[in-house]
Amino acid sequence: MLIKHAVLSLLIYGIIPLIISVFINPAVVFTVIIPVLGLLAIFHMHYLRKHYLIEVNTRRNWIILSLLAFLLALIVKIASIILTSFPLEKAFDFSIAFIVALYCGIQIKYTSGDSLRDVILGVLIYFVMFVSMLAPIWVTSILLGSKLIINVRALIAIIPFAFMVGLGEETLFRGLLQEVFVRRYGVFKGILTSSFILFILWHVVWYWRYESLFTFISFLLYSGFIGIVLGVFYEKYKALLPVIIAHAIWDTMFSSMSVPPASGIILYIPSIVISAIIYITSIRFLGSIKLGLFS
């Protein structure tokens, strides 16, 4: 039954958005159609969870199945970006990860039981990411004469899709891949593999459009560092809603707000050092709480 639903998900959430984008502006598909398909996918997966008995089956090769889900989602993502210049695969990311998790017997937990606490925690996670990775560099740019640019139209338009990005990618990377790799290799190697290495590979196709090699590498590293923060928080609280919210806020703000860098990379060395110190301190603090990730 689940294989049929996986094929159905590929058709509805993966291929149909590409077909629709031939007849409709891909930007409209990106901001309107994908969130609608995302809602459909949520009801679809809720139906599967109610009608498919979850049984943990260790005989199934979780690593291969989870990597297969990752590769299928990546193929759809590459096709979407090549054909439309937009990542239209987010509803498929969510559905294929959910289906594979069901098949493996992994129960994906979205809330801790206290939704308000999860929302507050999600905002806190975003704050940690912003303070440790963006704030020092933005402050340096502003002090050097740059101005904060806010695109209000982009801010409003991106919100529904940003939630789908959070839902899709967090279900795939934290709910499925991290669960599988942590159970197989332990917390440190599991987070490093799923939330850093695979998360970076996932973003290569998106950041490849940047002509500057420095920008390309910088954004990939940002993705990996973000993945680690999300992975550590998820491993501690074992609920996806907080990291979904943090991811959605990050993408919303990153897509609609910017501070153009001033000339002279050497002037940013102090802010980069400060970012690194804050980031490492945050990760070590989070990792030391209950998990014992770092000695």
Image (cartoon, rainbow, N blue to C red):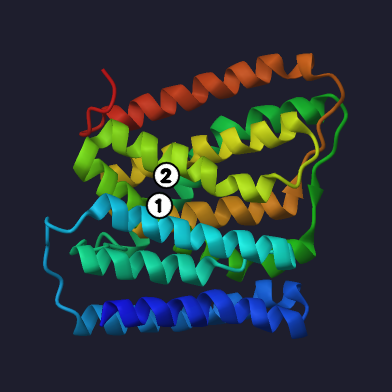
Residue 272, percent from left and from top? 64, 21
**At 70% from the left edge and 69% from the top edge, which residue is drawn?**
157
- Residue 63 located left or right of residue 229: left
Question: How many C-alpha atoms fall within 10 Å of the one at disc 1: few (<14), some, or many (≥20)?
Answer: many
User: What residue would you read off at disc 2?
Assistant: 230
Residue 58, percent from left and from top? 12, 55
Cα–Cα gap, marks 2 and 1: 10 Å
Judged from the image, the secondary structure of the residue bearing numbered disc 1 is helix
Question: How many C-alpha atoms fall within 10 Å of the one at disc 2: few (<14), some, or many (≥20)?
Answer: many
Instruction: Of the two numbered discs 2 and 1 on the same chain, state the one appearing first in sequence.
Output: 1
Residue 165, percent from left and from top? 54, 61
The quarter of the image holding the N terminus is: bottom left
Compare residues 287 and 122 and report the one nearer the observer: 287
- Residue 143 located left or right of residue 68: right
* Label of residue 173 in the image: 1
Say which quarter of the image contains residue 263: top right
How many labels, in total? 2
Residue 103, percent from left and from top? 23, 68
**At 43% from the left edge and 56% from the top edge, which residue is drawn?**
70
The quarter of the image holding the C terminus is: top left
**At 46% from the left edge and 37% from the top edge, which residue is drawn?**
197
Q: Amino acid at mark 2?
A: Leu
Q: Is residue 120 visible?
A: no
Location of residue 283 with respect to 54 vertically, above or below: above
Say which quarter of the image contains residue 2: bottom left
Location of residue 231 with respect to 59 vertically, above or below: above
Judged from the image, the secondary structure of the residue bearing numbered disc 2 is helix
Location of residue 69 with respect to 137 vertically, above or below: below
Q: Amino acid at mark 1?
A: Phe
Q: Is residue 48 visible?
A: yes
Q: Are marks 2 and 1 in contact (CB under 8 Å)?
A: yes
